[in-house]
Image: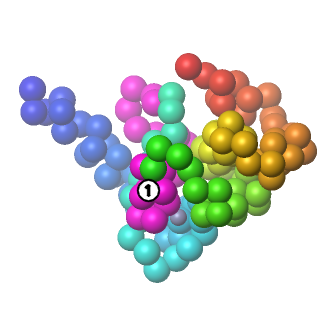
Amino acid sequence: MAHHYRARPDDLAQLGKDLVRRSHAHCELCGKGGRALAPHEVPPLPPRPELEHTIMICGQCQDELACGELNPLYWRFLETVVWSDLPAVQVMAVRLVRRLNEQGENWATALLDTLYLEPAIGQWLDAP
Ligand SMILES: [Zn+2]
């Protein structure tokens, strides 16, 4: 039914104000301001969208995410973002660094070696 189909985008839209406040209207990945931002849920998804499972990202980061192969030059800022104290941002960043590692990027490999992750973050990272 249409109601069910629309429920998730509507719930997500309702997080918008809180996300803008939390991110200070800057992309929570690349840190840039002055760009259109959109909520991005970090899997595994809870039954309904939650602020703690959602990050605010810009159009350019969305475009780069849509590429099959990640552009290592673009994503270099993850070197600092992996230390974020926002769990959803940290999980998203570490997953991307893991992909860059799988693509053979040496800096991503070195970064993963230095990374200390709280147990809860490790569980979220590896959740199916
Ligand atoms: Zn961005």
Residues drawn in magenta: 45-66
Which residue is under mark 1?
62
Q: Is 33 or 95 nearer to us in this picture?
A: 95
Q: Is residue 43 above or below residue 35?
A: above
The quadrant the C terminus occupies is top right
Say what amino acid the circle numbered 1 marks.
Gln
Q: Is residue 33 above or below residue 77?
A: below
Count the marks. Answer: 1
Q: Is residue 101 magenta?
A: no
Question: At which x and y percent is residue 25?
Answer: 49, 71
Q: Is residue 86 left or right of residue 20?
A: right
Q: Is 118 or 65 nearer to us in this picture?
A: 65
Crowding around mark 1 (Cα neighbors within 10 Å: few <14, some 14 to 19, many 20+) is few
Residue at horizontal 57%, vertical 60%? 28
Q: Is residue 79 left or right of residue 42?
A: right
Q: Is residue 57 visible?
A: no
Ligand 1 within 8 Å of the CB at mark 1: yes
Outermost residue to the front: 104
Outermost residue to the left: 1
Residue at horizontal 68%, vertical 36%? 102
Question: At which x and y percent is residue 47?
Answer: 39, 26
Q: Is residue 86 visible?
A: yes
Task: Report helix, strand or loop for mark 1.
Answer: helix
Question: At which x and y percent is residue 65?
Answer: 48, 51
Q: Is residue 58 magenta?
A: yes
Q: Is residue 73 left or right of residue 32?
A: right
* Residue 1, image quadrant: top left
Residue at horizontal 88%, vertical 40%? 113
Residue at horizontal 42%, vertical 58%? 63
